Image (cartoon, rainbow, N blue to C red):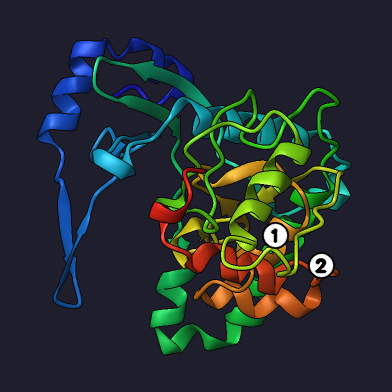
Amino acid sequence: MDSIISPRKVADSLSVEKLRELVRASPNHFTKNGRTFACHGFGYPKDSPVLFIKHGVHIFKPTDEEARNQRWAREALQKLPPSEREGIHIPEIYRVVSTETSTIIIMEFVPGKTLEYFLENPEYTDRLDRYFGKIERALKLFLSFPVPEDASPGPCGGGVIRSPLFKDYESTIEYPTVELLEMHLNKIATWFSKDADRLVLERKLHFVFSDLYEGNFMFTENEDLYVIDFEQANFLPLSFMTYAMIQHHDVCSLKDRFSLPENNLEIMRRVCQLDESLCKW
């Protein structure tokens, strides 16, 4: 392919039928350490990729909300002074294609390796402090982004909340206000006892990046960080970042470096543990 053609032009040149064809021909799983995992995307063109085409099935399907989150976050990051965001990036999205059955996100291809890769290979141990430091900076920058005045709890542009707090990582309804979100969570918190402790959520919203899986942080040869996968990003009270930071990921070891509220944490744990049959979110 002609090297002078820009990635955006390549993205625009792909017809919907061509995209369907590429998705059908791409591997739908891979094996690692004896375990099988679903594939959610691929580089294009295969030999010298300039695009990453993200797709998926079932709960792994990318969504319009994910694309809106990523675009908004990238724009917010670009507005910061270069000195503040040096070495921290979000891939540019060139195109979003909605078909009858799925959403396909075509974005910038990032040549690099994930934090997961470096954690699994002991020869890179000397890099980990630097890498965790950059992830810390990125997450703190995300929390500092000015949130639109008309934003409601949830993804950019509206929608259900995707967060580890909810069963299957997804609320079943949208919440137009923090007050309604708090009311519903407290309904669960007091299900067995009306005298049980209640949540008091912060009214200010932050851009909370909740999916701290090690594969969502990619480093280039120059050790620049690219944050990927904005499905579980939302405008939420800061207590939701606290809850994200107690999940079973290595990145959660950074929790003590953040000034996060703790007053709601145990109640949020209790809410999450209750069976969904007790409450329709």
The residue where tag 1 is placed is 241
User: As displayed, is residue 272 above or below residue 154?
Assistant: below
Front in this rendered view, residue 198 or 236 = 198
Q: Nearer the viewer, residue 111 or 185?
A: 185
- The answer to whether 144 is drawn above or below residue 194 in the figure is above
Q: Amino acid at mark 2?
A: Leu
Residue type beneath disc 1: Met
Mark 2 and 1 residues: CB-CB less than 8 Å, in contact? Answer: yes
Residue name at image x 64 percent, y 62 percent: 190
Q: Quadrant location of residue 206?
A: top right
Decide which of 101, 172 is in the foreground and name it.
172
- Looking at the rendered structure, the secondary structure element under dot 2 is loop
Judging depth in this view, the residue of 280 and 51 nearest the camera is 280
Residue 219 lies, in percent from the top left, at: 54, 61
Q: Mark 2 and mark 1: span between their CA atoms?
A: 7 Å
In the drawing, does residue 85 fall left or right of residue 160?
Answer: right
Whether residue 138 appears in this view of the structure is yes
Is 155 placed above or below 162 here? above
As drawn, is 80 to the left or to the right of 28? right
Residue 254: percent from left, percent from top:
69, 76
Residue for point 80% across, 53% down: 201
- Category of crowding for the residue at label 2, using alpha-carbon neighbours closer than 10 angstroms: few (below 14), some (14–19), many (at least 20): some
Whether residue 27 sits left or right of residue 75 in the image: it is left
| Quarter that holds the N terminus | top left
Q: Position of residue 226 (x, y in %)?
A: 58, 51
Residue under pointer 2: 260
Q: Where's residue 168, x and y in %?
A: 39, 52
Residue drawn at 14 percent across, 23 percent down: 21
- Residue under the point 55% across and 58% down: 165
